[in-house]
């Protein structure tokens, strides 16, 4: 503290600098500001009570520790003058700055001086100085403009598929060559896949997954981040919770896509963030290597959405989320009764009655036996002759014969050649028009015919390419299914994980009375290949 007993003023010298100000040509360091203020007070014989310095704090609000300490000394009458290098050091919110200068300080008898802007509250007619509010407005405009430019720059990076987050998602890390590119973290990537598999094939919910991870002593994302940054982490590093697991399982970056702009700040003055509607998100697909397949993602989301947890009798329903009514499309739920066997019935019928749907009564044991038998037959067919199985399945799901594919391929080549020929013809017509060999009317007539023919050819080419791609997708799907079922040597019994890995849905029809009893159709739709009669 530098006090001068002869002065009637005891000054609080305030200094401020933030990251935004570092880009401002008018801003200077804290030490330089202190020197300017000290020299000014010495020259004018003002006593300096203390320097109040906020380094790294924005001027858009007054939630700053040293500013609060200064105002406490103002309230207690310890100082009667506030001196700053310029108005922007005091603050960049023109409404609040004006309030302090025009209301708060005058009421407390505080003299305010901004050296660089030639502002002195003791000067007469300061309230008539039109430049004072204008300077405050311009000071606020600067951080607003910086904020706008920063948002635009980040949005441009996001649209280019660059990662702009401060921390990579759990399972990834930033590339050492380019921090805007995500690469797989071999240490944590298997954990991410395991989490999705627990949801998709074991029917676990968010809380149960969190419990399993905690029991296995898997370090949490926050704890791992602190560990790698060499920061202290005071919580239990193995305590996973619902929120952490839920956030991970909704993160589409695990599919290889980047999504930005889900949240935004209310304004540059506030730290509060608000959610953005999905149509304002920035989505760029295939920006990095995925950790999980699209199929695993869909299976996990479907399982979490349709989980049925446990029956009233305490038995786990291994068919939960798989059984569908052929009439209304809704799920079949399990029912337990002490005097009859466990069975399934349509949930629509159960809730709304026979006017909306029929019961679709199905015994648990019967369904179990039907599915187990079908899965075993599939597995035996693959094990006996995998290539033969692929051929049979391809034929059943509508794969084109080899000759048909050759015909499609041949037609595609013919169309492409003709389209190229028409392009060349159009160029010749255009040259003839420029050379005066064709009239404008003749050129439009001939070029119009070229364009009409090209439009028809391109439409047909699109149809053929779509057909060819569909056939390729079918080949891929059959191979994926055979690879999937080949992971099992034999199937002795059914469990929830096996069913959810192999089967997409099981559609159950109502029972029909026949001569010797009842008949009921059960359609099993396998992953990738659908239903096979």
Image: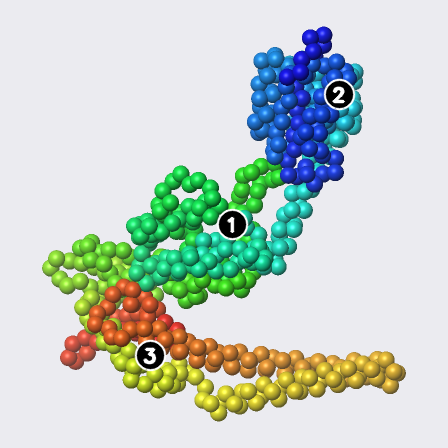
Q: Is residue 388 above or below residue 264?
A: below
Residue 359 falls in image quadrant? bottom left
Q: Residue furthest left?
A: 339
Side (left or right) of 508 relative to 45: left
For the residues labelled 2 and 3, the Cα–Cα distance comes to 90 Å
Left or right placement of residue 511 versus residue 412 in this view: left
Residue at far top of view: 6
Q: Where is residue 286 in the image (x, y as percent from the top left)?
A: 53, 64
**Measuring 69% from the left and 25% from the top, which residue is drawn there?**
34
**Label drawn at residue 532:** 3
The reply to whether dot 3 and dot 1 touch (C-beta < 8 Å) is no
Q: Name the residue under label 2.
A: 40
**SS under mark 3:** loop
Provide residue 449's location: percent of width, then percent of height. Answer: 72, 83
Q: Is mark 1 on a helix, strand or loop?
A: loop
Contact, mark 2 vs mark 1 (Cβ under 8 Å): no
**Residue on which the image places disc 1:** 167
Gap in angstroms between the C-alphas marked 2 and 1: 45 Å
Report crowding for label 1: few under 14, some 14 to 19, many 20 or more residues within 10 A (C-alpha): few
Q: Is residue 263 visible?
A: yes
């Amino acid at each position: 503290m530098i006090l001068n007993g002869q002065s009637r003023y005891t000054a609080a010298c305030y200094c401020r600098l933030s990251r935004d100000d570092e880009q401002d040509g008018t801003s200077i360091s804290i030490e330089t500001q202190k020197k300017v203020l000290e020299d000014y007070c010495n020259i004018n014989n003002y006593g300096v009570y203390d320097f109040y310095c906020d380094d790294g704090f924005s001027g858009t609000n007054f939630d700053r520790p040293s500013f609060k300490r200064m105002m406490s000394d103002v309230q207690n009458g310890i100082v009667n003058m506030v001196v700053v290098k310029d108005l922007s050091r005091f603050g960049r919110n023109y409404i609040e700055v004006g309030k302090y200068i025009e209301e708060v300080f005058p009421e407390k008898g505080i003299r305010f001086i901004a050296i660089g802007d030639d502002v002195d509250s003791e000067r007469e007619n300061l309230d008539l100085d039109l430049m004072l509010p204008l300077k405050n407005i311009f000071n606020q405009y600067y951080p607003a403009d910086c904020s706008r430019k920063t948002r635009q720059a980040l949005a441009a990076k996001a649209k280019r598929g660059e990662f702009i987050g401060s921390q990579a998602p759990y399972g990834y890390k930033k590339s050492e060559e380019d921090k805007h590119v995500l690469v797989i973290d071999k240490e944590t990537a298997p954990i991410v896949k395991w989490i999705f598999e627990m949801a998709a094939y074991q029917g676990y919910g968010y809380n149960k997954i969190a419990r399993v991870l905690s029991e296995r002593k898997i370090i949490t994302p926050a704890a791992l981040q602190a560990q790698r940054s060499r920061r202290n982490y005071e919580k239990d590093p193995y305590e996973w919770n619902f929120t952490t697991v839920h956030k991970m399982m909704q993160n589409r970056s695990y599919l290889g896509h980047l999504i930005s702009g889900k949240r935004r700040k209310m304004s540059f003055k506030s730290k509060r963030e608000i959610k953005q509607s999905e149509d304002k998100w920035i989505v760029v697909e295939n920006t990095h290597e995925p950790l999980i397949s699209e199929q695993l993602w869909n299976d996990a989301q479907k399982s979490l959405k349709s989980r049925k947890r446990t029956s009233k009798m305490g038995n786990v329903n291994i068919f939960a989320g798989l059984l569908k009514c052929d009439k209304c499309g809704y799920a079949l739920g399990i029912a337990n009764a002490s005097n009859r066997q466990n069975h399934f019935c349509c949930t629509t019928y159960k809730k709304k009655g026979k006017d909306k749907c029929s019961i679709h009564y199905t015994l648990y044991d019967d369904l179990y036996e039907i599915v187990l038998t079908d899965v075993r037959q599939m597995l035996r067919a693959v094990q006996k002759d995998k290539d033969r199985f692929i051929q049979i399945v391809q034929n059943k799901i509508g794969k084109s014969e080899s000759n048909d594919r050759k015909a499609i391929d041949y037609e595609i080549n013919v169309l492409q050649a003709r389209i190229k020929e028409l392009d060349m013809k159009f160029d010749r017509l255009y040259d003839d028009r420029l050379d005066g060999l064709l009239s404008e009317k003749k050129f439009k007539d001939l070029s119009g015919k070229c364009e009409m023919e090209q439009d028809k050819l391109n439409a047909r080419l699109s149809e053929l390419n779509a057909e060819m791609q569909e056939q390729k997708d079918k080949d891929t799907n059959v191979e994926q299914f055979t690879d999937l079922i080949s992971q099992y040597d034999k199937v002795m019994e059914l469990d929830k994980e096996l069913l959810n890995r192999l089967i997409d849905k099981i559609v159950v029809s109502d029972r029909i009375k026949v001569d010797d009893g009842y008949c009921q159709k059960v359609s099993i739709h396998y992953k990738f290949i659908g239903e096979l009669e």
